[in-house]
Amino acid sequence: MNTLLEGKTGIIFGVANKRSIAWGCAKSLAQAGMRLAFTYVDERLEKSVRDLVAEIPGSLVLPCDVTKPEEIDEVFETVREEFGYLDTVVHAIAFAKRDELQGDFFNTTKDGYMLAHEVSAYSLTAISRRALPLMEGREGSIVTLTYLGSERVVPNYNVMGIAKAALEASVRYLAADLGPRGIRVNAISAGPIRTLAASGVKDFADMTSHIADIAPLRRNVTSEEVGDCCLFLCGPHSRGITGTTIFVDAGFHIMGG
């Protein structure tokens, strides 16, 4: 373990299991000395998260369904009581109904559209607002996760691509609001990684194979690589960067097809 982030604290929303990109971020931050809190969305995922977090001494594990404002309030009240302050928020939450992630986008239901935006985009604003009192003036960092489907049409990504576009716009507006308060806000656009969330995207395996063939590095990326980018964005070496989306996708985003 290095000591780059010793004495710093953070909270990570979105760990589901060991394949989660959020877990890759957690490992990189913990190895740099940061004390962490984690959330889980429901009882179905609680054991998985607690088993993982047992590897990181001193961590908190808290329930939080971001569609329930009172649970977000309770999370940050507990963090205030236990940590006293907060330096980092990692927002790795995204959800859309499985049947919205296939077929034609124009068949998206209103309920499906609103749910995807509430969980995947609005939650960043809701979380940032509550984190502000604990982060203000600490040169803190908020990092969220996005995907190329926000900029380009990706088959079967559908409503999630629209939600990610809203998320990236939120990053820019939050960066403008929170910068004078000493808080940076950035996004990581990660290449496709075999996670629980990705399993809902139809033909995901074909997508990853295509990217490995086309990307300049001729491969897909790992959650550890995304985690190390998160470490960079949460540490002092990125202190001049805010409102930005950094791609960790083996260079695929620069290619034409």
Image (tube, rainbow, N blue to C red):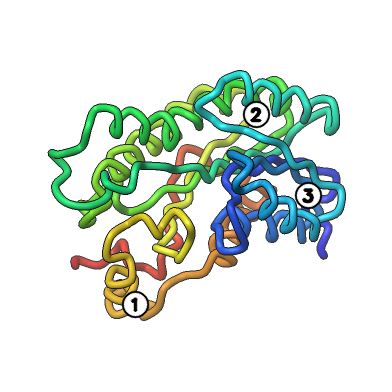
- Write the residue at 84% across / 25% down: 81
Q: How many marks?
A: 3
Identify the residue position indicated by label 1 in the image.
212
- Write the residue at 27% across / 49% down: 101
Give the answer, above or below, for where 249 lies relative to 89: below
- Write the residue at 28% across / 32% down: 113
Q: In the drawing, does residue 29 fall left or right of residue 252?
A: right
Q: In the drawing, does residue 210 fall left or right of residue 139?
A: left
User: Which one is in front, 153 or 57?
Assistant: 57
Q: Nearer the viewer, mark 2 or mark 1?
A: 1
On residue 247, the disc is none
Q: Earlier in the sequence, mark 2 or mark 1?
A: 2
Q: How far is disc 2 from disc 1 in space, using C-alphas?
A: 39 Å
Amino acid type indicated by mark 1: Ala
Tell me, yes or no, if residue 240 can be seen here: no
Q: Quadrant of residue 117?
A: top left
Image coords of residue 67 (percent x, y)? 50, 27
Q: Residues within 10 Å of mark 2 (few under 14, many from 20)?
A: some
Image coords of residue 162 (percent x, y)? 28, 39
